[in-house]
Image: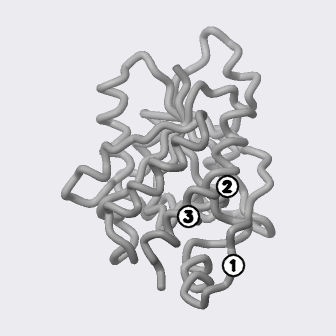
Amino acid sequence: MRIGILGGTFDPIHLGHINPALDVKQQLHLDQIWLMPNHIPPHKNTTVVSTHHRLEMVKLVCQQFPEFKLCDIEINRDTPSYSVTTLTLLTQQYPDDEFFFIMGMDSFVQLPLWYQWQSLFNLCHIALCQRPGWAMDTNSEMTKELLFRQATADYLDSPSHAKNGRIFTINSQLVDISSTEIRQQLAQNIDISTVLSQTTTEYIRQHQLYR
């Protein structure tokens, strides 16, 4: 199977996560998207709501969207969630599958700060979604990496294509809002149901989160 992996704190999960992942699935003809909540994110100090609530919100999204499946490999880990460690485990557990790690352009340019980041290309492809108004520095290390590894969906039609090491840029109508902004608006009791799935909105209201 061809599987997209979208990791994050999902605090809360919102359409800025969901819509690009669906675009990746459609444009690369993937079989599934696995949503992978972090327990201890390596690049953030903490999360606002508990691991339990973040996990439950992702489960509800997976129930609402049949394209998604929960991947709980990181949420059950008591150490920081390094992507290369996780993908090493996944490729060992599912040796016949092909993984596509979904990330935004803002994360991609920060990739050299990630733990053993170059090893990612030995484990998976990268599906790269661009935020509105984002432009890469033409002289940056990651621009050169992108030019070297860039491929189109047609590449996947070749029976001899590699199962890792390529970067696919995704055309996506991204929702230009962050989880931080969503939490701030929820705290101010502003209606933001347009950027949350219905199940997430109801869960947040039911459990009085982000107040």
Residue 43 lies, in percent from the top left, at 39, 69
Instruction: Kindly tell me whether residue 137 is visible in this rendering.
Output: no
Instruction: Tell me: residue 27, above or below residue 54.
Output: above
Residue at far bottom of view: 188
**The disc labelled 3 sits on which kind of residue?**
Glu
Q: Secondary structure at mark 2?
A: helix
The residue carrying mark 1 is 191
Instruction: Tell me: residue 162, above or below residue 147.
Output: above
115 sits left or right of 201 in the view: left
The residue carrying mark 3 is 202
Gap in Å between the C-alphas at discs 3 and 2? 41 Å
Instruction: Tell me: residue 146, above or below residue 49.
Output: above
Gap in Å between the C-alphas at discs 3 and 1? 12 Å
Gap in Å between the C-alphas at discs 2 and 1? 38 Å
Residue 195 lies, in percent from the top left, at 69, 65
Q: Secondary structure at mark 3?
A: helix
